[in-house]
Amino acid sequence: MDNNFVALLGTKGGPAIRPGSSMPTSNLLCLNGHKIVVDCGLGVTRGLVDQGLQLKDISTVFITHLHSDHYLELGGLLHTAWTAGLKTKVNVWGPAGLDQYWNNFVASMKSDIETRIDDEGRPDLRKLVAIHVIDNDDIKLDTGIVVAPMRTEHPPLVDCFALKFTSDEKTVVFSGDTAPIATMVDFAKDADVLIHEAMLESALPALMARIGNGSEKLMAHWLRSHTFAHDAAQIATSAGVKQLALSHLIPSDDPDYSQDDWANGVTDHWSGPLHVGFDGIKIAL
């Protein structure tokens, strides 16, 4: 299990956290012993440490899109890894514009970074991190793992990506944030696990009432930009994946809805192994 697994570090859909809630999206993928961070929502640093990862060993990060619940803590993670002894290169792949976030982050931390270089003898963090733009081309990592991106439908954003990670033995697909799309079936074909975002349809009205933001725009966003659990299950069945994991759950923190409700929501469309995401769950491949 230790050489091939995926750990869902943060499984909440959306950026807000409340007492008792799970944390926004982040994941740790391990293929043939090579560890890759996928998305960096709030809490990713703690989540990685809880999985036993030495932060100084981080080398590869992917960001699926530029919504805050997927990249808010990227800067904090890399800076903390640096203070924990990071001195080797980190490659970060993400949509166009991620470099602006990173440049602004290190600019905001200029005083701290330069003080630690002078006072503690650390290498320059700004020279350790390389930001790469995801487009339509496959990415071959130095480890031999191939990463295939596919644009998803997550309006109003355009550069939103599902990611397929393939080693010589295993294939893992992250849907990213997306409305249900037919192209996901071929993209995830025969994957060892599909991690797909999910909404519980019956719970959305109660969630809107609880949020109470006074606007129907949020519900409209959910309905045009995200996927119901039963639709994710249909995609997984059509793709013939070996396991289905539901994450980026909307809602994730309503005490009136349990894992049984999520399981019941997919039972008519999926009969294989099901993992209803919770923070820290580790799924063997």
Image (tube, helix red, strand yellow):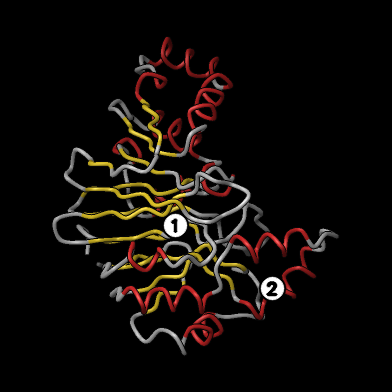
Where residue 9 appears, as percent x and y from the top left, is: 44, 57
Work out whether residue 103 or residue 88 is closer to the camera in this orientation and state it.
103
Secondary structure of residue under mark 2: helix
> Where the C terminus falls, by quadrant?
bottom left
**What's the amino acid at mark 2?**
Leu
Where residue 194 appears, as percent x and y from the top left, is: 36, 67
Q: Which residue is mark 2?
A: 204
Residue drawn at the location 40% of the way across and 29% of the way down? 131
Q: Quadrant of residue 189?
A: bottom left
Q: Nearer the viewer, mark 1 or mark 2?
A: 2
> Where the N terminus falls, by quadrant?
bottom left
Mark number, residue 9: 1
Dot 2, crowdedness within 10 Å: few (<14), some or many (≥20)? some
In 3D space, how far apart are the residues under numbered discs 1 and 2 (Cα atoms)?
23 Å
7 to 84, vertically: above or below: below
| Label located before the other in sequence (1 or 2) | 1
Work out whether residue 79 or residue 232 is closer to the camera in this orientation and state it.
232
**What's the amino acid at mark 1?**
Leu
Where residue 66 appears, as percent x and y from the top left, is: 54, 42
Dot 1, crowdedness within 10 Å: few (<14), some or many (≥20)? many
Mark number, residue 121: none
**Left or right, residue 101 beside residue 61:** right
Residue drawn at the location 19% of the way across and 57% of the way down? 3
